[in-house]
Image (cartoon, rainbow, N blue to C red):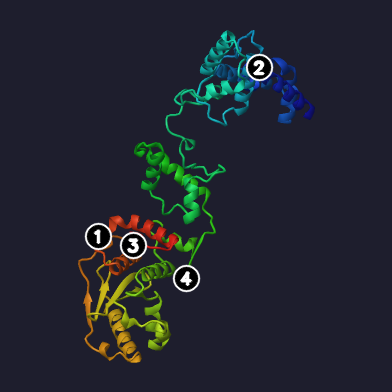
Amino acid sequence: MKKQKKILWRKGIHLAFSEKWNTGFGGFKKFCFHQHLCILKAKLGRPITWSRQVKHFQCRKKALQIQKTWIQDAPFFAKTKSSVAAQNVSTLSSKVKRQDSKHFISSSRTLLRLQAERLLSSAKNSDHEYCGEKSVLKAVADLPASNVLGQANGHRPRTEPQASDFPMKFNGESQSPGFLDEVMKKYGSLVPLSEKDVLGRLKDVFNEDFSNRKPFINREITNYRARHQKCNFRIFYNKHMLDMDDLATLDGQNWLNDQVINMYGELIMDAVPDKVHFFNSFFHRQLVTKGYNGVKRWTKKVDLFKKSLLLIPIHLEVHWSLITVTLSNRIISFYDSQGIHFKFCVENIRKYLLTEAREKNRPEFLQGWQTAVTKCIPQQKNDSDCGVFVLQYCKCLALEQPFQFSQEDMPRVRKRIYKELCECRLMD
């Protein structure tokens, strides 16, 4: 069996380098028809009856007829007196066959033949020696990209762009990193990548609007994400560490966890260090569980009463809220994206501040405290974005920005928070 395969392989090589363009295994029939029966018998592993053999060759004949409709079994190039040109054409023929359907050749077989014949005729009339296969290959490469594909393999002309047409290298298999590879390396996933980013990159490179090809772009991004699901990406900032499980809470409609809330609060606090202090999300729970002594050491190196604003996230199992303390006018405010007011949380913070002022010997803060429920603020319209609203409240209050966001902006806000965490800085 191995010997017969080797003989067929040699004949196939001989046939491939001949002057005829052959269409698959059917082109070998005149060479190995008498050997086909024993090969078929060994492949099927059972006796071959005459009716089964006839049926098999009828199918083979029909397949060969269909292949001949794709491309005619005609001489690929005509004979020429120029031996140099004939050698170059033969080299081109073998190169094209070896490439097969693996690489995109933007011309049909007919166009290739016409182009080659034109080059051969010009070689005859020229006085100097033909410059070699580079000119032929360059001529093939210069053919317009809108031509028909290699129809010898049964391919249809392209009606939509392919991944190789774009500078982003969607498949991520090239040696040089593509656009999606850069995003993965920087952010660990494609969560922060928006459709606007991709269209902007394409417009910068091609100077063309690709808005009408969004389905193709989204499909390629989805396929790329499916091939790169597992990643050991991590973020370290001060004492905080986020892995992909933490960052995944910013994707879609997931609930934000304490790690994301605390690290983002650290970024806010470092953006305005002399003005704002952000409490850990476990602060209120520890205060309720163990009282003031359980959190007394949390402000050992911080004088809260020298700050202008205190931000205290409140996590009540399945919901996030925010308590702010404005020390200049001694007002404790409550922010909730669902319009809920947890009075006991505000009262716990008021008692804590009185005890802290007494312990730090700040008598001016032992009286005059007021509580307020902030209304007319952006509200959520689902059950999953409360944590995102809390972080957006904190950022706007710390940077003294107006509340100009709504539920419709939350997907964009989630992507921006993801980028800010990965880059360890706040963005405008």
Q: Position of residue 382 (x, y in %)?
A: 31, 60
Q: Position of residue 384 (x, y in %)?
A: 35, 62
As displayed, is residue 339 above or below residue 183?
A: below
Give the residue drawn at x 54%, y 44%.
176
| Closer to viewer: mark 3 or mark 4 | 4
- Which amino acid, mark 1? Gln
Counting residues from the start of the chain, the first of labels 1 and 4 encountered is 4
Cα distance between the residues tagged 1 and 4: 30 Å
Cα distance between the residues tagged 3 and 4: 26 Å
Query: Which structural element holds mark 1?
Result: loop
Which disc is residue 87 wearing? 2
Counting residues from the start of the chain, the first of labels 1 and 2 encountered is 2
| Closer to viewer: mark 1 or mark 2 | 2
Front-lying residue, 50 or 246: 246
In which image quadrant can residue 304 be found?
bottom left
Contact between labelled residues 4 and 1, with CB atoms less than 8 Å apart: no
Which disc is residue 385 wearing? 3
Query: Which structural element holds mark 2?
Result: helix
Crowding at mark 4 (Cα within 10 Å: few <14, some 14-19, many 20+): few
Q: Position of residue 303 (x, y in %)?
A: 36, 83
- Identify residue for label 1: 404
Residue that lies at the very extreme toward the left in this rendered image = 376
Query: Which structural element holds mark 3?
Result: loop
Counting residues from the start of the chain, the first of labels 2 and 3 encountered is 2
Q: Is residue 392 visible?
A: yes
From the viewer's perspective, is 401 left or right of 186?
left
- Identify residue for label 4: 238
| Closer to viewer: mark 2 or mark 3 | 2
Query: Which structural element holds mark 4?
Result: loop
- Which amino acid, mark 4? Asn
